[in-house]
């Protein structure tokens, strides 16, 4: 047997950059926004869902929001003004032919690196446009503060951030939830629990664009921005029997997802103070089960840890409120992206200690006191969490053979790597709180 060693690059610092004091929740040190404290009367309202009928927004209510053409122009101007850290590309077109444009922000935009990638998606539902406006503001903030603000610099230098401000430009133009075909795009993805719409050709072009995008690029984590409530939602969104009853249904990485959701909630102005959702986070199946959602599909099929973020109580608030909403959500968005660097297991290369040559890792196993995680390269995942452990796949970069995986701070792990024909190597790690 030949020997190899593992040069793990571990990012285990959980105290994220901020001038605000840290907030302690569930034993995790998190950063809260410095915008202020929750005042009496700031209760979180119940969500108003318009799924059984169209909620049409009047022209007066949409005044002050960028049109699709104005958003496209703003993205192009951004790419020119911030060309040193950005590029703009298209992942496809909507039903009506409008381009689905993405901004990539990195110190080396357009280049593949052994760095984690994060994506934000806004305006999944046409009548929930706050996300598209906030994501444009986030991009401009990163450009303006790069090399001035430590958190902005950390993200740009260590993450490839991809921002799709509007997944549903047609629905936005029509001021309704669904796309031009009146299909809810967050019910249009393949679902492990509720087989539906399995023929690729039957899916909407916006859905197919996201799926192709995920096949072409490897994302470590993701978040989609919605409106109508104030809460960070995490998998599973449905139950194994496809039922509509509301009960907690945990995915294999439930503890990691709860940590990620808490990062967002406790960095927010008042999300964590919710009277409706404990700590400002909720399991999707417990809140209200859905099937065909984008969040679960990301996790199951591409190993991407995605949250569904409800960022404003109103679906379509007045435009004068947008800057305030951005300030309420800015640190949350930044800290969530930074978590893929700060609470990450990063395994870049396996080195043959005798021949000093690089090899591609075939499997990586993480074990702690409550679960086993098996990570294999470029295979599909189809298993359910049980008391015996977890058989779960996180895809790796074929170019670099590198793995990026968010882990829960305060946990101990045994990491075992193995390659056929070589002796396995086990390393113990501990992520500090």
Image (cartoon, grey):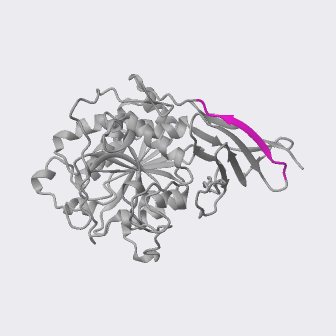
Q: Residue at x 38, y 41 (%)?
A: 278
The span shown in magenta is 422-432
* Residue 425 is a magenta residue: yes
Quarter occupied by residue 381: bottom right
| Along the viewing direction, whichever of 141 and 110 lies nearer the viewer | 141
Which image quarter is the C terminus in? Answer: top right
Question: Residue at the location (13% across, 51% down)?
Answer: 61
Q: Is residue 173 left or right of residue 343?
A: left
Query: Which one is in front, 326 or 86?
Result: 326
Give the quarter of the image for residue 189. Answer: bottom left
Residue 40: percent from the left, percent from the top?
Answer: 22, 30
Q: Is residue 348 visible?
A: yes
Q: What x and y, as percent, mark residue 135?
A: 33, 44
User: Is residue 232 shown above or below 23?
Assistant: below
- Residue 150 is covered by the magenta coloring: no
Q: Is residue 307 left or right of residue 11?
A: left
Which residue in the rendered view is the most extreme toward the left?
60
Q: Residue at 39% x, 59% y: name it.
A: 246
How many numbered marks, from 0 up? 0
| Residue 93 seen in this snapshot | no
């Amino acid at each position: 047997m030949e020997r190899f060693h593992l040069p793990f690059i571990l990012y285990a610092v959980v105290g994220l950059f901020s001038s605000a004091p840290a907030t302690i929740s569930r034993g995790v040190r998190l950063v809260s926004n410095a915008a202020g404290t929750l005042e009496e009367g700031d209760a979180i309202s119940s969500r108003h869902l318009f799924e059984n009928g169209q909620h049409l927004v009047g022209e007066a209510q949409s005044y002050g929001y960028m049109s699709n053409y104005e958003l496209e122009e703003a993205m192009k101007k951004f790419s020119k003004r911030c060309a040193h850290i950005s590029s703009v590309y298209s992942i496809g077109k909507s039903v009506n032919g409008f381009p689905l444009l993405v901004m990539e922000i990195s110190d080396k935009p357009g280049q593949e690196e052994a760095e984690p990638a994060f994506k934000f998606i806004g305006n999944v539902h046409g009548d929930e446009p706050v996300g598209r406006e906030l994501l444009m503001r986030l991009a401009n903030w990163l450009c303006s503060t790069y090399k001035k603000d430590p958190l902005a610099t950390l993200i740009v230098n260590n993450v490839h951030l991809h921002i799709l401000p509007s997944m549903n430009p047609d629905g936005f133009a029509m001021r309704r939830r669904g796309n031009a075909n009146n299909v809810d795009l967050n019910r249009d993805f393949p679902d492990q629990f509720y087989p539906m719409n399995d023929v690729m050709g039957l899916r909407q072009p916006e859905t197919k664009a996201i799926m192709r995008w995920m096949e072409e690029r490897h994302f470590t984590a993701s978040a989609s921005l919605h409106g109508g409530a104030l809460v960070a939602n995490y998998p599973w969104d449905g139950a194994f029997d496809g039922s509509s009853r509301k009960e907690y249904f945990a995915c294999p990485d439930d503890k990691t997802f709860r940590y990620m959701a808490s990062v967002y909630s406790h960095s927010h102005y008042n999300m964590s103070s919710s009277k409706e959702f404990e700590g400002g986070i909720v399991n999707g199946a417990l809140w209200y089960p859905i099937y065909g959602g984008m969040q679960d599909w990301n996790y199951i099929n591409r190993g991407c840890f995605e949250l569904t973020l409800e960022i404003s109580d109103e679906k379509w608030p007045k435009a004068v409120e947008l800057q305030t909403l951005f300030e309420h959500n800015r640190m949350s968005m930044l800290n969530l992206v930074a978590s893929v660097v700060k609470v990450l297991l990063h395994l870049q290369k396996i080195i043959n200690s005798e021949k000093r040559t690089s090899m591609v890792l075939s499997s990586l196993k993480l074990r702690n006191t409550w679960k086993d995680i098996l990570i294999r390269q470029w295979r599909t995942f189809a298993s359910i969490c049980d008391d015996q452990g977890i058989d779960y796949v996180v895809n790796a970069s074929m170019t670099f053979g590198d793995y990026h995986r968010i882990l829960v701070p305060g946990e101990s792990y045994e990491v075992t790597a193995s390659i056929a024909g070589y002796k396995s190597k086990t390393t113990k790690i501990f992520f500090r709180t």
